[in-house]
Amino acid sequence: MGVWTTLFRKFRGRRSYDESFLAEHIPAHIAIIMDGNGRWARRRGLPRAAGHHAGMLAMREVIRAADDWGVQVLTLYSFSTENWKRPRQEIDYLWQLVDEFFQLDIEELVERNVCIKIIGDEEQLPEVTQATIQKARNQTIANTGLVVQFALNYGSRSEIVKAVQTVARRVERNELRASDITEGAIAAALETADVPDPDLLIRTAGDQRVSNFLLWQIAYTEFVFVDETWPEFTRTHFEESIKTYLTRERRFGGLK
Ligand code: FPP
């Protein structure tokens, strides 16, 4: 099958000519910090939960867009290790939303050949949520299309610490000498070992920080910050962010 046939097979919607350029240069891995749900709600006089619900709807559309464009990996920062500092009620609602999302969307995700992955420490999640996630993962485990990594109870420093512990245990067992520890050995011990590093990181809602997200993996990632809050982020914003990414010259520390 020719490359164009493959690309066009990925399209589910109508695409104009100049969008075919986009399809050809689509980043393999896009990571997103979905920020601003609370602000979206506050500006509308709504409870924060309404913002998170609207955020879930935006997330659903972006997963569809990423799949339609043939993105290989989409990583979504859904709950950070720091988010436990929020009021109990808000945290409970977020887990409820995760359950709701997987229950409502699993059929479509299976149909789209999406493979669901979780990064982060699942053990602290409510048992119901753990079960929902496990079920969704099992149902999509053999899928070969878009990999969606939900970062749930995820913190990058904690991920790196665990990876270093894994490598240190190999040293303790005399499988590896300390002087032989490579970047590859650390990367292989991270939860993201089986996917390429992100090409593009998008953060919504105007703040320009990384918030303990994929610190190791974003060494050469291009950042795109958008002012819209996450619930306002549409398929068009997603495509515009990719277009912005395409204007960047990636040199990976080398020369042009
Ligand atoms: C940040 O906005 C957003 C979150 C902490 C939650 C992200 C969750 C979703 C998009 C919903 C669905 C997720 C799944 C996996 C079903 P914020 O609340 O910090 O916004 P603020 O800074 O304006 O208060």
Image (cartoon, rainbow, N blue to C red):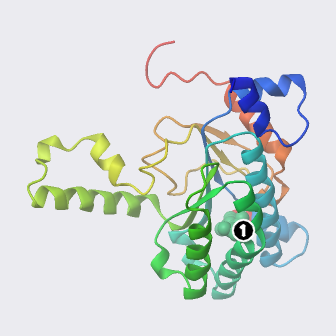
The mark tally for this picture is 1
Residue 216 x, y percent position in the rendering: 42, 47
Give the quadrant of the N terminus.
Answer: top right
Q: Determine the secondary structure under disc 1.
A: helix
Is residue 2 left or right of 175 when viewed as pictured? right
Quadrant of the picture in which ligand 1 is shown: bottom right
Q: Residues within 10 Å of mark 1 (few under 14, many from 20)?
A: some
- Residue at numbered disc 1: 106
Q: Is mark 1 within 8 Å of ligand 1?
A: no
Vertical order, 167 against 197 (above or below): below
* Residue 104 seen in the figure: yes
At 60% across and 86% down in the image, what residue appears? Answer: 128
Q: Hey, which quadrant is residue 33 in on the image?
A: bottom right
Q: Hey, which quadrant is residue 80 in on the image?
A: bottom right
Q: Residue furthest top?
A: 256
Residue 225 x, y percent position in the rendering: 69, 43
At 69% across and 87% down in the image, what residue appears? Answer: 89
Is residue 82 left or right of 140 when viewed as pictured? left
Say which of 61 and 9 sits in front: 9
Vertical order, 102 against 2 (above or below): below
Q: Amino acid at mark 1?
A: Ile
Residue 42 x, y percent position in the rendering: 84, 71
Vertical order, 4 against 89 (above or below): above
At 25% across and 62% down in the image, what residue appears? Answer: 165
Say which of 224 and 60 sits in front: 60
At 85% across and 23% down in the image, what residue appears? Answer: 18
Residue 88 x, y percent position in the rendering: 63, 87
Is residue 92 left or right of 49 when viewed as pictured? left
